[in-house]
Amino acid sequence: MGSSTACLLLIVVSAHFLLSSAENIFGLTGLGGSLIGVITIGVASAAPELFTAVSGIRAKAKGISLGTLIGSNITNPLVARGGGALISTYWVPRHLIY
């Protein structure tokens, strides 16, 4: 088995584990599915940037680490929340907005 196939298999198994864990958290806590989804997407999308930042620090390339942390960890949660808001049926009462 090639390394690409092994990595793909690892990704599929990890995704299955992640989704099973999210379903268990949803069942145990009773929190909304949208909230669990946004948190899951946020953590999953921030992990590669975290590893890149740590690798940059180890290689003494602090500029890469800083750019990765600032850029991705501001963008990723905002995109995830916006996407979740687009598909969610949750609404905020008008008086709270004002």
Image (tube, rainbow, N blue to C red):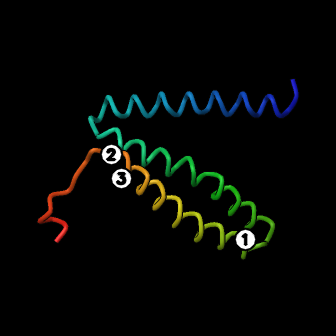
Left/right of residue 47 with respect to residue 82 in the rendered view:
right
Q: Which residue, as the protein is rendered here, is positioned at the far front? A: 86
Check disc 2 and report its element: helix, strand or loop: loop
Vertical order, 43 against 26 (above or below): below
Tell me if mark 2 has few (under 14), some (14-19) or many (20+) residues whose alpha carbon lies within 10 angstroms of its own.
few
| Residue matched to label 1 | 64
State how far apart marks 3 and 1 are (Cα): 31 Å
Q: Which of marks 3 and 1 is in front?
A: 3
Mark 3 and 1 residues: CB-CB less than 8 Å, in contact?
A: no
| Residue matched to label 2 | 88
Check disc 3 and report its element: helix, strand or loop: helix
Looking at the picture, which amino acid does disc 2 mark? Ser
Residue 75 location in percent, x, y?
53, 64
Q: Which residue, as the protein is rendered here, is positioned at the far right? A: 2
Q: Which residue is drawn at 56% across and 27% down?
A: 16
Rendering quarter of residue 69: bottom right
Left/right of residue 89 with respect to residue 79 in the rendered view:
left
Q: Nearer the viewer, residue 21 or 84?
A: 84
Looking at the picture, which amino acid does disc 3 mark? Ala
Looking at the picture, which amino acid does disc 1 mark? Ile
| Residue matched to label 3 | 85
Q: Which residue is drawn at 40% across and 49% down?
A: 84
Check disc 1 and report its element: helix, strand or loop: helix
